[in-house]
Amino acid sequence: MSIKDAYTDSRLGLSFELFPPKTPESEAVMWRTVDELMAFDPAMITCTYGAGGSTRGTTLDVLKGVLARHDLPVASHLTCVGSSIDELRDYLRESLAIGVAAIVALRGDPPKGETAFRPVDGGLRYASELVALILSEFPEFGILVAGYPETHQEAISAQADLENLKRKCDAGGDVVVTQLFYDNADFFRFRDRCASLGITQPIVPGVMPVTNYSQVRRIASLCKAQLPESFTQSFEAAGDDEAAQFEAGVTYAARQVEELIAAGVPGIHFYVLNKSPATIRVLDHVGMKRAGA
Ligand SMILES: Cc1cc2nc3c(=O)[nH]c(=O)nc-3n(C[C@H](O)[C@H](O)[C@H](O)COP(=O)(O)OP(=O)(O)OC[C@H]3O[C@@H](n4cnc5c(N)ncnc54)[C@H](O)[C@@H]3O)c2cc1C
């Protein structure tokens, strides 16, 4: 099956992003999350690849675990950070052997304390080069690439960043998954600009329901996402009340998702952070049918 088939006119392609858990307790929560989210018949589950390749083995362990429990395509994120081309090949071979269907092909961030990305000797400089490697040597994989509605923080201009996205798509990217954002206007502008550059791949918005204001400020500052006034106002109104903050986050994300679906997006990629309550509430709110319901 081509990964593009996950996004059809008759079905919204839902994907859920996990990260490798650090403790047995958090692993148990993650598996409960996966089992609960399966009720929404996702098109795919993905698992992140830690900075500097730090989760190499555990990323694949998570995906193996998903495949042992459920029958659906899984995707491994993979970055160029700290790996030679031969090491990337080894990882891709291993991924193929365990049944990974797709790769989210990324460059990765510079290591902590460094401002510029530097490839290792014999490594790759850009995600577009990783996409080309996968397509030429591992054509079995579907390939997802990252898009930035608010422009990647190192890009010299929004236009240069879009041209890079086009390069990744032309090199073999099948689907674009975006960085999280909180203002749908940023996504719609980005989608229009992709269309005018001739990017025809499905563009799947990344959504992270936020349930805790300090968490959102930290994540938004890490990935440089702007927080619209209506968003900060609803969290400020919730004050220190954790339950009210959860409600504010779920309500905001549900409105965001509702508007995206109405605007015809092919799917939604949820940054679920290994927990299901907020994502489930959002999906229920927008009327996504549960299996057997
Ligand atoms: C959906 C999604 C999932 C992610 N998952 C992970 C993960 O699992 N692990 C992780 O560590 N990080 C992850 N990231 C973060 C990502 O690694 C960073 O945003 C990283 O800084 C850029 O990766 P990229 O693949 O977009 O890089 P690239 O597409 O290579 O772009 C990097 C920068 O270089 C510029 N550029 C690209 N090509 C050229 C060129 N030829 N000439 C000049 N400039 C160029 C681009 O405009 C951009 O500013 C994820 C991001 C997203 C959106």
Image: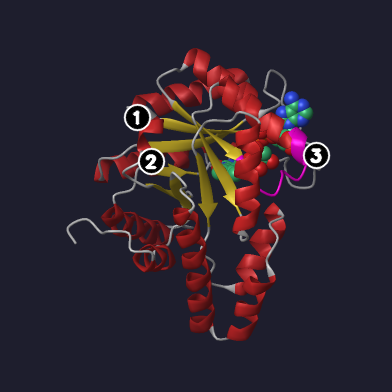
Q: Is residue 40 magenta?
A: no
Q: Position of residue 262 (x, y in %)?
A: 45, 56
Q: Which residue is mark 1?
A: 98
Ligand 1, image quadrant it occupies: top right
Q: Residues within 10 Å of mark 2 (few under 14, many from 20)?
A: many
Residue drawn at x 65%, y 48% is 189
Q: Which mark is residue 157?
A: 3
Q: Amino acid at mark 2?
A: Leu
SS class, disc 3: loop
Pointer 2 and pointer 1: residues touching (CB < 8 Å)?
yes
| Quadrant position of the C terminus in the picture | bottom left
Residue drawn at x 58%, y 84% is 238
* 230 vs 209, nearest the viewer: 230
Q: Earlier in the sequence, mark 2 or mark 1?
A: 2
Residue drawn at x 17%, y 58% is 292
Can residue 108 be seen here? The reply is no
Q: Which residue is mark 2?
A: 63
Q: What coloring was used for the rendering?
A: secondary structure
SS class, disc 1: helix
Of the two numbered discs 2 and 3 in the rendering, the one whose residue sits closer to the viewer: 3
Is the magenta region chiefly helix, strand or loop? Answer: loop
